[in-house]
Structure formats: structure tokens, C-alpha cells
Image: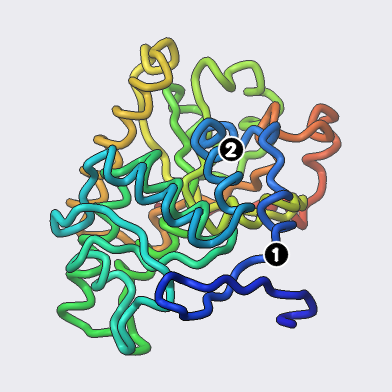
Amino acid sequence: MEAGRFVITEASPAGAVRRSLPAAGFADIDWARPWFAQHETRGRRWQQAALAGYGRYLDELNADARASAQRTGRGQPLAFIAQDDLPEGAAYEAHIAATGCVPTRHNLHDFFNALAWFAFPRIKATLNARQSAAIDVLGVGPTRGDARDALTLFDENAVLFVCAAPALSAALRGFEWDTLFVAGRAHWGTHCEVRVFGHALLDKLIAPYAACTAHAWVVDAPAQYFVWPRAQRDAWLDEVVSTKLATDADLNGRSFSPLPVLGIPGWWPQNEDKAFYDDTSVFRPGRRAR
């Protein structure tokens, strides 16, 4: 038993025993939630494979990786391996960059990480390239530096705040929640939207709670973005954000703005009542220089 729950084990063809997540973890994904919608088609198929077992799950991920012909940070073909196959002492990001192989546990955190590789492949490859380059310089010691810390924040907890209305971007950066969520409510979906990127954030949103806060990366978009088909928006975001991440020499924790996820219009029934935004423990006032 692990952390108060039973753990399924599964034998690999070589006879080694792998640890596996209880089926309830994957069964708890509610695809009706708006933050999971971008992954639903592929995610439902992977979910069924994950419920069938660790080996079946990895097979499904790798079939998609082969079909996509995607590459990791240093141009290696993308693949997924069991966590136990990560060589002892190897740094996770450096291993991915050097071999193309993403160590993947049979759990929700890594499930959502794998989905991100397919939703935004260029962003994931860029994050991997910069992380592995930093490891080359600094190693894997306790001090990672501002840029690498920011890359980790992006990978784990970022949302893309895509906006064609400068007043709404300014409201987000200025903690002006009434302007952003109440007065500006009619502009959501037509002038701004949020796309969840961080896989740890998606893991947390299995069981949503009011204080769940993302690191928002603001993407200034042209007005026509909001009439493009979804595939065109995805490709544009992947290109624009990956280019910025690759070239931003000043990347740090202040490159993001806090965004309480359940405040997003249409994402949580309770926020239809504007009193929802009165909770200052969640929607905190504040100003900061940027």
C-alpha cells in the first residue's frame, strides 16, 4: 500500500515489476470540464489505455509519438519510457533532450505532461532545450537560476492568456479583477481566452478549489485570432510562444501574472454571481512594477 491506497503492479515482458496507479486516478477525469476540453479526443483514448494497464498506456503514447514524428529539445524523436528506465543519476530534462525519451509514470501528473507534448509540441521542445542547456552550464545542483525556475513554472503551472484587448491584459497584470472578470465579462471568448498548459495545474484541477491559481503568460493576439479555426489558433500559439520562450533573456518569475482559474467566465458556475470575486483571499488586490 502507498500513501494510504493500494497500488497495482504489472509485470513487464522482461519480468520486472512496475508500479502502477490505481484505476480510480484516471477514472476521475471529467472531460466536461472546460480546462480538459483541448485534450479530450486524444485524452479519452489514452485514458482507456491507462485504465487497462501501464504497458498498454505506454504503447498508446508511443504509437502517437511515432505517428506525429515530433522531436524533443535537441532534435531527437519523441518517445515515452517507464520511469524505471531512466538511468540512475540522469537528469530528467537532459535525458529527454539527449535521447528523445520522456520518463513517464503511470499517474495523472505524467498523463497530462504527455498530452502537452501533443497539444503544443514546439513549446514543450523549447522548454526542454532551454532546461537542458541550463543543466549543461549549471548542473543539477540546488541553485537553478531565475530562468530555469521560470521554465519550470511554465511547464508545471502556466496558462496562456491570449488577448486582443489591451485593457484586459492590463487588468490581469494589475490585479483589477472587477475589470477583468465582471466589467469585461462579455469580451471573454471574443477578445480573450485562456488555454491551460501546465500539467501539474491540470492534475490539481481534477478536484477544483477556489484558490487554485495559475501562472498566466500573456500572449498579445490579433483580433482575427478569435475567428480562426481551433487548429489554426493552436499552431499560431505554439509558434509565437515557443519563439518568445527561446529568445527571452530576461525570463523569471515576474514574467507571469497570477490568475485564479475558477474566476474565468464560463469555467465555474459560482462565478456567475459577481460576489464570487469578493473573496480577497483568492482575488487579492495589489500592484507591482513590470
Residue behind mark 1: 22
Of labels 1 and 2, earlier in sequence is 1
220 sits to left or right of 180: left
Nearer-the-camera pick, 158 or 59: 59
Label 2: which secondary element: helix
122 sits to left or right of 263: left
The CA distance from mark 1 to mark 2 is 17 Å
Mark 2 residue crowding within 10 angstroms, few (<14) / some (14–19) / many (20+)? some
Residue behind mark 2: 44
141 sits to left or right of 46: left
Mark 1: which amino acid?
Pro
Decide if residue 101 is in sight here.
yes
Q: How many marks?
A: 2
Label 1: which secondary element: loop
Q: Position of residue 272 (x, y in %)?
A: 81, 27
Q: Position of residue 65 (x, y in %)?
A: 31, 46
Q: Is residue 187 above or below residue 5?
A: above
Which part of the image, by quadrant, shows the N terminus?
bottom right
Name the residue: 70% across, 58% down: 23
Q: Is residue 73 above or below residue 87?
A: above
Mark 2: which amino acid?
Arg
Q: Position of residue 242 (x, y in %)?
A: 26, 44
Q: Is residue 272 above or below residue 97?
A: above
Decide if residue 170 is in sight here.
no
Name the residue: 55% across, 64% down: 106
Name the residue: 34% across, 85% down: 143
Q: Quadrant of residue 219?
A: top left
Q: Is residue 255 above or below residue 32?
A: below
Q: Position of residue 176 (x, y in %)?
A: 62, 40
Nearer-the-camera pick, 148 or 77: 77
Name the residue: 29% across, 57% down: 127
